Structure formats: structure tokens, C-alpha cells
Image: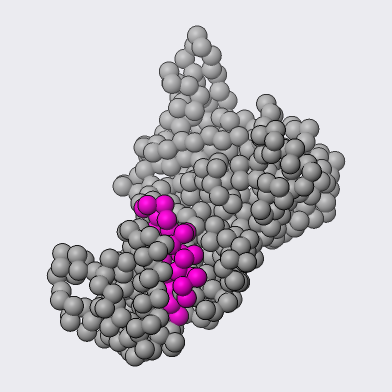
Amino acid sequence: MANFVKIFDTTLRDGEQSPGCSMNLAEKLEVAHQLERLGVDVMEAGFAIASPGDFASVKSIAKNIKNTTVASLARALTKDIDAAADALKGAKYPRIHTFIATSDIHMQYKLKKTKEEVLATAVEMVKYAKKFCQDIEFSAEDASRSNPAFLYQIFEAVIAAGATVINVPDTVGYTSPEEFVTLIKGIRENVPSIHKADISVHCHNDLGLAVANSLAAARAGANQIECTINGIGERAGNAALEEIVMNLNTRKDLYGLDCRVNTKEIHKSSKLLSSITGVRVQPNKAVVGENAFAHESGIHQHGMLANKSTYEIMTPESIGLSENKMVLGKHSGRHAFEDKLKSMGYEMDPEALTTVFEQFKVLADKKKDVTDRDIEALVCRRVVQIPQAYKLDRFVINSGNTITTTSSMRLLSKTGHILEEVVSSYDGPIDASYKAIDKLVGKKFMLEDFVINSVTGGTDAQGEVNVKIRNNNRVYNGYGVSMDIVEASILAYISAINNMLYDQEEKKEV
């Protein structure tokens, strides 16, 4: 068994297919850069043929990422492979990832093809893709429910046609660790040319076994695991990258496997994705949940004080959580603030640093203690830069339990115009503010989701607000943070509108 496993991240492709997790080009590019810093071996940038937006994002990521293989998904069709190859032209390390279903149920009802036709198509399309780049991954969709003998046959054929990676997906999350081990061992023993290709696995979490199945496959000889940050993905999601990596890292005695991922970038990657998509992980989520390193039980706390290893099998620092005790306040200078950001793993260009520092000084004037989580919230607010069609200038709320709430809203447009509106509402200050913004923008949006979270404890805590708005059957995410929860809500709503307008401009350009 090999002592190294490659990490293939599909957050930008399979992960983005999760409801509510769509990202615009700037957001995808920021995630791609973070995946590069994280140290994944391969990132699947998208499904180039799916839409002009997907094509543009694959093309942009391929052009900008230099240390990681960039892949694009393609069905076993020439038009899909042409689109993938075109989008990947600028990649330093391109990979075309083509797939076709191999289970009886998929071949009969979805493809309406015989085994012989599927086999011939797979071989033909791998040969076709090989004309564009050397690194070709072939996936047998629904492999875990496919006839093993047919899998052996098709894998041997596509390797002969030029495939460098064969992927064994548990597409519907059906298999168990024991079954998956048997399947992987069977492939290793019955595909004569298997030594010429990597064996990859791609597991879904419908029965909660995606990580367990992936790790079992790695012990059985698979040397690439496909996964996503926070386990996002269709239905119940994909295998969670952070759980796989920390299993390998924490239980080297069991797995005997290394990977290239820099574990100290895990927390930041998780937080970035949550901020962009507005989809938070549950508090008890393994590795990256808010409670992953929290100890409330008196027995546990006593043990921790005596020796942390009594109840912690990995340290917060190992995933990039800072325990730096340097306290920043309103008298802290830019240099100290920049050093603090670096200690937390954030590198920012001078312009972004200036903006975040100014926001920090405003916050420090209001709060006695500014925590790492406060700073992290400010950074996440600024982390993705897109053109701001609208900015909040000021707002005034008149509210009480015996009067009708009014919101006086003033926005600045990118053309320099001042837009002002006053709206009354019986449903409170946020509803009045959102209606005022709708009037100023000239559109009415459906609010799909609205989530408020406290960054820290205490009455002086910052509030984080994530919203999702719907316009023309498309959902857009927005994020805002402020000590004033109404202001945070307004900033999140404006952020979502700016994301929508940016996305529409992108499509026009494409």
C-alpha cells in the first residue's frame, strides 16, 4: 500500500451544487486561492459546459492557480470535453475529468445504453480527451452499485486508452466501509494495468458514511480521495476534507498515510467558505465546529487542566486556531494589527489591509476587548472584492412597540448618486430597511433565508448576518457584520444585491 494519498477537492464543482452554496466568479477565485494555500493536490474548478459562468470560472481559476492541478468535469461527450479543454488552456497543470454511468440501473433508465455501448463511449472519449492534455481522470458513475466484473473491464480499457486516474464514486452514498474495501481490492487484483493509474474514490454522505468509506478505501489501496470543505455537496453532501485530513494526521498509527495538506489552513478555509456561502457548519461538527475544542463538563475540564491529551486528540493550533494572547485595542497601531493578522494566517494587500484596519479602529472604539473572532469577522467581510454597485451611507430607524417603524435609508451608487428613501412598516426595523432598499434599487427581492449569529459572547458582541435573496429563480448570498444588528442586516442585504448585479454583469461579458 502506498504511504501517500492525494487530496482532490471538489468544493467548487460538486460542493457548489449544494442548494444555497452558489458562488460568483470573484468568490470562486478566492476559494481557489485558499485551496492552493491549503495544499490540495487537485481542485475541480467546475463543469465547463454547464453554463457560461461555469466556463468563465474554470478559465479564470486555470489561469491564476500555479501550484495545484486544476480539473474540469465533462460528460463522455465531445462537446463537454471541448469546453473543458478550452477552459483549461491557461492551466499549468490541467486535468480533464470525464465520466459515464456504469451501474445497470443508470445504463438502463438514464443512458438507455448497453454495456457494450458504454464501454465503447468511455474508451473513445478518454482517447479524445487525451488529445488536449496528458492528465485524464475517468469516473464510473454509480460505481458502488455497478457490476464489479464490468468495472474491471471498463477500467482496464480506459487505462489502455490513456486514463491516468480511475475514479470509483459512491455516487448515492449507498456502500459501507466493508463493501468498499472489497470493491477497491477487487479492482487492484483484477485490473491488470491498474499500476499505471491512480485509484480515486468519491463518496457521498447519504447514510453518513462518506468519510468512513473514503478512509477505508485508502487503507485498501486507493491513493486519491475526493472531498469538499465542510462536506458541502448535493443532498447530504460529500466526504469532508477536514475530517479526512485530520484522521490521516491524527491516526498515522492506523492509516500510515500522509497527504500534502497544510492542516493549519483548515479553520480559515472552513470559515471563508461559510462566510461566502452563508452556510454555517453545525456547532458539533467534527474538526471545524464551534464546539469541536470546547469542554463544558467539569470532569473534562479537570482532565484538561491536568493534561490536555486527556480529552483532546488534536490541538486547536493544528487546524489554525490561534491562541495568541496579544490583546488589540483602540490604541494598537497598524503594524501590531498586521502582525496579528499574519499570526492568524491572513495575508492582505495594502488597500484591503487599510480598509480592515480602519474598521478595526471603529470597532475598538466601541468594544473594550477585540477578540480573534472579531478580527476574523472583519476580514471575512472584506475577503472577496467585487464592484460595489451600492454602498450604505447612513440609516435612521424610528421604532417602538407603540408606533409604526420607519426606516430612512441613504445609499451611494457606483455612479456617485445619493439615493434616499423613507419606508414605514409594521414588521420592524429590518423589514422597513429592506423595503426601503428595494425601492432605491428598483427591484423587489424574495428573502429566502436570514440568519443572525453572535461573533462572541456579551452584549457588546458583533453580530454576523447571512442572507439569501432570490431574483429570477437564482439565489444570491450576502454577508454583514456590525455591533448594531440592524446595520449588519442592512449590510448583508446590500452585499447580496451587489453579488446579484456583479453576477449579471459577468454573464453579459461572457
Residue 33 pos. (x, y %): 58, 65
In the rendered image, residue 203 lying in the magenta stretch gets the answer yes
Which residue is rendered at x = 55% and y = 50% of the image?
A: 286
* Image side of residue 390 versus residue 192, left or right: right
Q: Is residue 422 visible?
A: no
Residue 205: which quarter of the image?
A: bottom left
Q: Quadrant of the C terminus?
A: bottom left
**Residue 267, percent from left and from top:** 62, 54
Instruction: Reply yes or no: does residue 46 show up in magenta.
Output: no
Q: Position of residue 478 (x, y in %)?
A: 49, 44
Instruction: Left or right? Give the position of 103 relative to 200.
Output: left
Residue in the picture at 26% in, 86% down: 124
Q: Camera-side residue: 384 or 306?
A: 306
In the displayed structure, 94 sits above or below 403; it is below
Q: In this picture, which residue range is highlighted in magenta?
A: 198-221
Residue 417 position in % (x across, y down) = 53, 42
Is the residue 110 above or below the residue 93 in the image? above
Residue 351 sits in quarter: bottom right
Residue drawn at x 35%, y 44% is 471
462 or 399, which is in the foreground?
462
Residue appearing at x 43%, y 88% in the figure: 196
